[in-house]
């Protein structure tokens, strides 16, 4: 594939995940990623700020989708129902992407720097959700608690979804996790 061909961003992301999976994150250079994608390092840095960000490229769009879904729920709905609507919305992004998610998560789990980056992204998501809930009139500490619970449900549901032999959809696992949370705190579904 030549440099002038379309989908440079996707080609770089695919090359990075392939190389990280084959060699490990630390052992892979940006030059190698660009070369595997048939592109230059300069092109890489036009699309991604650093070597890590290629794995977290969709986090901004995911956060926006989650927050917008929370905002669209009628204000009369309890905060947990708004967050559940957000979880339903983000689950759609992962349809047909389980194998990619499994590979990506294996790379992240194998590297402390990437685990740290993932935690930062999740903290950002929680803060954005808390802001969205406050805009709906949810007071503190309920807004922050509900946002953190939503992120916890997302993490637990995602981890269950990528587990070996799991056949349920991410949406099913998220809904089940919300149900477990509701049961744990004694709130009906």
Image: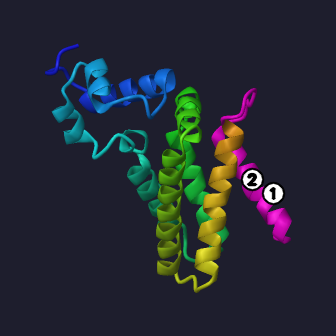
CB-based contact (under 8 Å), mark 1 and mark 2: yes
**Residue at mark 2:** 177
Is residue 76 visible in the rendered structure shown here? Answer: no
- Check if residue 169 falls in the magenta segment: yes
Q: Residue furthest bottom?
A: 139
58 or 39: which is nearer to us? 39
Figure label count: 2
Quarter occupied by the C terminus: bottom right
Q: SS at mark 1?
A: helix
15 or 32: which is nearer to us? 32
- Name the residue located 43 percent from the left edge and 50 percent from the top edge: 59
In the displayed structure, would residue 37 be above or below residue 72? above
Boundaries of the magenta span: 162-189
**Residue at mark 1:** 180
- Name the residue located 52 percent from the left edge and 34 percent from the top edge: 104
Q: SS at mark 2?
A: helix
Task: Say whether residue 98 is left or right of residue 23.
Answer: right
The answer to which image quadrant residue 47 occupies is top left
């Amino acid at each position: 594939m030549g440099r002038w061909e379309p989908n440079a961003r996707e080609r770089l992301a695919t090359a990075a995940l392939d190389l990280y999976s084959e060699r490990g994150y630390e052992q892979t250079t940006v030059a190698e990623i660009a070369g595997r994608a048939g592109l230059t390092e300069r092109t890489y840095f036009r699309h991604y700020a650093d070597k890590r960000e290629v794995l977290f490229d969709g986090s901004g769009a995911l956060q926006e989708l989650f927050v917008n879904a929370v905002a669209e729920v009628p204000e009369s709905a309890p905060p947990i129902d708004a967050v559940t609507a957000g979880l339903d919305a983000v689950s759609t992004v992962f349809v047909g992407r389980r194998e990619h998610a499994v590979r990506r998560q294996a790379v992240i789990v194998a590297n402390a720097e990437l685990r740290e980056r993932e935690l930062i992204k999740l903290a950002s998501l929680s803060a954005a959700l808390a802001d969205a809930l406050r805009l709906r009139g949810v007071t503190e500490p309920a807004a922050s608690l509900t946002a953190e619970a939503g992120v916890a449900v997302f993490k637990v549901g995602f981890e269950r979804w990528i587990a070996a032999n799991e056949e349920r959809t991410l949406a099913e696992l998220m809904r089940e996790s919300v149900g477990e949370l509701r049961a744990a705190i004694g709130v009906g579904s």
